[in-house]
Amino acid sequence: MTETHKQTAQRRSRRMAAILAGGVIGMIALSYAAAVFYQLICREAGLGGATQIAREVPDKIFDRTITVRFETAVQPDLPWAFYPVQHEVKVKVGENALVMFRAENKTDEPITGQAVYNVTPDKIGPYFFKVACFCFDVQTLAPHEVADMPVSLFLDPKLLKDKNADDVSVVTLSYTFFKASTHLVSEAK
């Protein structure tokens, strides 16, 4: 093989390696963004246990009571403790409930996290509203800071008209905290 052919083959190999590396980097970036995009799409469409956002609470409270349980998780790359202050509340349909979650940064550095959430059973998602939630924004905790984070929620009275939801007596609201990407942190400033 001549020197020119060797150089051409090396250029092709480098080009192919660059294309493959770009593809791998692109897939990694998309996987990090997938959780946020999934949440946005589901919230807008009311799918997959996505909850709704309300500006105000209903003006009437009904007799039907539903237990709302809380589950929490933290991704391994986020060195935080995160848990509900109370593990469940009993809420009447239309009643606003304020619940607290606690997060602790276990490091010597400030860290920013973002929570994603869902509610099960999925069929309750269109009726589960939050007026305020720490999950609407990124959260930055100083070194070893412990923060109480509120959630204001209610179950929409329209739930009472959905015969498919008559069997629901327990709802689970789940949160998972992720280390916030640099993109999300810069948007929040």
Image (cartoon, grey):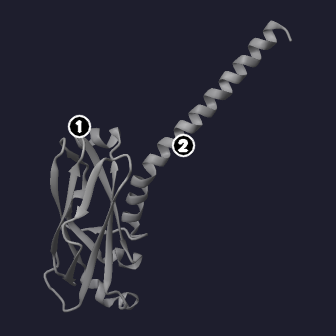
Answer above or below: position of 163 versus 38: below
Disc 1 crowd rating (10 Å Cα; few below 14, some 14-19, many 20+) is few
Front-lying residue, 29 or 176: 176
> Residues at badges 1 and 2 in contact (C-beta under 8 Å)?
no
Q: Quadrant of the N terminus?
A: top right
- Under tag 1, what secondary structure? loop
| Residue 56 in view here | no
Report which residue position mark 2 lands on.
27
- Image coordinates of residue 123 in percent, x first then y, are 40, 79
Disc 2 crowd rating (10 Å Cα; few below 14, some 14-19, many 20+) is few
Answer above or below: position of 126 versus 28: below
Which quadrant of the view contains residue 43?
Answer: bottom left
Total marks placed: 2
- Image coordinates of residue 107 in percent, x first then y, are 24, 42
Q: Which mark is residue 160?
A: none
- Image coordinates of residue 13 in percent, x first then y, are 71, 23
Q: Residue at x 18, y 45 (%)?
A: 144
Report which residue position mark 1 lands on.
109
Left or right: residue 2 compared with residue 181: right
Q: Quadrant of the C terminus?
A: top left
**Which kind of residue does numbered mark 2 sit on?**
Met
Front-lying residue, 41 or 68: 68
Answer above or below: position of 178 versus 66: above
**Which kind of residue does numbered mark 1 sit on?**
Glu
Q: CA distance from mark 1 to mark 2?
A: 29 Å
Front-lying residue, 36 or 101: 101
